[in-house]
Image (cartoon, rainbow, N blue to C red):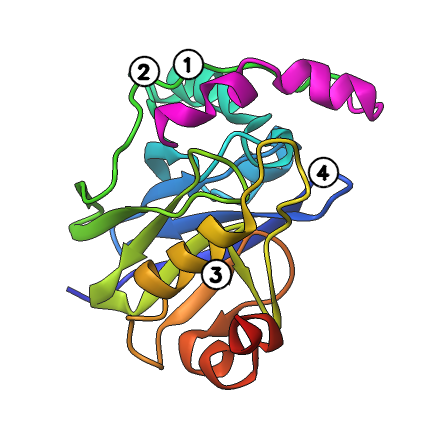
Amino acid sequence: MSGLNIKRVPVTPLRQNCTIIFNSEDHAVVVDPGGDVDTIISQLDGMTVDMILLTHGHFDHAGGAAELSEKLTKKQGRKVEVWGPDEKDLFLLKAISAQGNALGLMGLQDIIPDRFLTDGEELDLLGYRFEVRHVPGHTPGHVVFIDEANGRAIVGDTLFRGTVGRTDFPYGDFDALISGIKKNLMNLPDETIVLCGHGLPTTIGEERKNNPILARY
């Protein structure tokens, strides 16, 4: 087994990182297709998509999931399901089009996933085990995906290079976010690559040493 490869595809005016994870057999999983679906499909290079995963319910992460699932299902001849996040984000997933329209981003679609995910679940994807960890605070139902075998954590909008996710929403919870990051991410090895929802990747070791917010709290 030769490991998994990654493509980072920034989408929407918010430059959200849609992540394509793929193996040597050209099977892929797409994480957080927030929009610009045709751009995402153009980056799949003939791959077969097995699953679409969502870290949380914000429009820039989930707004293209329904369209992508529909187009891939038609193209591949079988349903490409959308899994995640935790059900606590259902209220956000049902308001995606309204969120997008308010910002002039037309065409984003509400979605009810085929399956919600819960803390501690293990997903068998692309021949590897992905652990689901619930890290609320940015949104109530935010989850992260830990690919321990390949030394990666796909963290959505929880942890960033030098900072953490926003919690200044009515449903935000700064204390829960910091607690969740420390419990579910900072216990990973220093060399773990952190694939963030916006911006460049970082590592757990880098954030352990240099993230001023985590150092302060």
* Foreground residue among 87 and 38: 87
Closer to the eye: label 4 or 1: 4
Q: Nearer the viewer, mark 4 or mark 2?
A: 4
The quadrant where residue 146 appears: bottom left
Decide whether residue 92 is among the magenta residues: yes
Alpha carbon separation for disc pair 2 and 3: 30 Å
On the image, numbered disc 2 is attached to which residue?
77
Q: Please state the horizontal and vertical placement of residue 144, each as a whole percent of the image.
A: 37, 49
Q: Which residue is mark 3?
A: 195
**Residue that mark 4 sits on:** 12
Q: Report crowding for label 1: few under 14, some 14 to 19, many 20 or more residues within 10 A (C-alpha).
A: few
Q: Position of residue 7 (x, y in %)?
A: 49, 56
Residue 217 painted magenta: no
Does residue 96 sit above or below 133 in this rendering?
Answer: above
Give the magenta part as a residue range. Answer: 85-105
Q: Residue at x 78, y 24 (%)?
A: 105
Q: Which mark is residue 213?
A: none
User: Dot 2 lies on which element?
Assistant: loop
Seen at 58% across and 32% down, the residue is 171
Relative height, residue 187 to residue 21 (above, below): below
Task: Compare marks 3 and 1 and give the one earlier in the sequence.
Answer: 1
